[in-house]
Amino acid sequence: MVEFYYKCVDCGKEFDSSKLRYLCDECSNYSKPGTPPKGVLKTVYNFISINKTFKQLKKSGFIDIYPIENSESLPNLRVGQTPMYSITSLDNEKMPFELFLKDDSQNPTYSFKDRASALVSAYAKEQQINTIITASTGNAGSSLAGICAANNQKAIVMIPESAPIAKLTQIIMYGAIIIPVKGSYDDAFDLSVAATEEFGLYNRNTAFNPLTIEGKKSVAFELFEQLNNSVPDMIFVPVGDGVIISGVYKGFEDLLMLGIIDKMPKIVAVQAERSDNLTRNLYSVNFKINESNTFADSISVDIPRNFYMTKEFINLYDGESITVTDKQIFEASVSLSKNTGLFAEPAAAAAFAGFLKYGHSEGFGENSKNVVLLTGSGLKDINAVKSIAQIPKAINPDINELKKILKL
């Protein structure tokens, strides 16, 4: 196992990796109700001692900078190594810059969350832990359930009762214990933490278990490899809690610390206007919550639990943020589907909406390389597009009726 330790993003206190860790035992006690929790831990490696031959990416999508003994602990599923498509035109107009769509709906349970679940599952397996619990609006839960099924582990998933039925169906089919909770995601999160303490379960929650960020950073390694060992100019990332974007930053930061790259990409945090509690508070003195009310359920968050780490990354590496309306997300989803054949759930389409809005207001440099992370399949939430997904009435098997419809 590579040498690593944990470091609190708030107070800087360091913890060894000899036992299970979640939050900083000091800063987490100072968290106030209605504000993001403090004490999220960052996994730090001894880069000086790491042989630089590790820069060669493995076929599994993992690099040898992970807190597990070996890759055999990972589930026997293809997690990561998702396709990235080059798009040269939109609406029949050729673009003077390069656009790449990273399609993480091609993960085993059809979302980006499999990257975190796989690493958490592998770590648990090596620690002889058989049951993992998580709170989720759907994607993390179905991910944990599927990954645990593949790795012969038990999963307990707590979800707000409003979660989309498609995601709940996945959880049930994978054989996990599903527990709907009255209230919001935050209520489910708090109950799962209480269950962790009460029953001694291993918790997968993002911005609670530091290994989730380590799993998600694998996408940065893949982007670097798929772009012929180069760094993109801009990356658009959908943001709720701030864990995915922190994972993207962490992956590129690891490459930077190893001397494999010499610059960081410009990373843009995209939030829904009706759930902008992370980006709106980035430069505020006092954190203020606006109740989330976006149809993009996967990024609908009142309290962004990885706020402080995300803020640190954005400030350190000159990141940007942008908000998009639900209408813009919906229109982006339609445009993405019709132009590329990729059907993304609203949270994923939000990143594409951010790309479109940024392009209209700021523009992109000629020949620049721009990436949009598509983090989940549109099949996860069919209800989101039901207003346009109307099936026409059936016709008689008559060629004349068909001729009228096709206008041939």
Image (tube, rainbow, N blue to C red):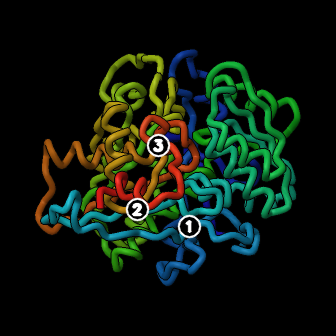
Visible residue check, residue 287: yes
Q: Amino acid at mark 1?
A: Gly
- Between disc 2 and disc 1, whose residue precedes? 1
The picture quadrant where one finds residue 326 is top left
Q: Check disc 2 and report the residue beneath it.
A: 341
The picture quadrant where one finds residue 135 is top right
Could you tell me residue 236's position as x and y percent? 33, 51
Query: Badge 2, how many Cα within 10 Å: few under 14, some, many 20+?
Result: few
Q: State the residue in front, 225 or 295.
A: 295
Q: CA distance from mark 3 to mark 2?
A: 15 Å
Which secondary structure lies at badge 3? loop
In which quadrant is the C terminus drawn?
bottom left
Q: Check disc 1 and report the residue beneath it.
A: 80
Given this view, does label 3 or label 2 mark the residue nearer the observer? 3
Q: Check disc 3 and report the residue beneath it.
A: 389
In which quadrant is the N terminus drawn?
bottom right
Q: Amino acid at mark 2?
A: Gly
Query: Badge 1, how many Cα within 10 Å: few under 14, some, many 20+?
Result: many
Could you tell me residue 389's position as x and y percent? 47, 43
Given this view, does label 2 or label 1 mark the residue nearer the observer? 2
Q: Amino acid at mark 3?
A: Ala
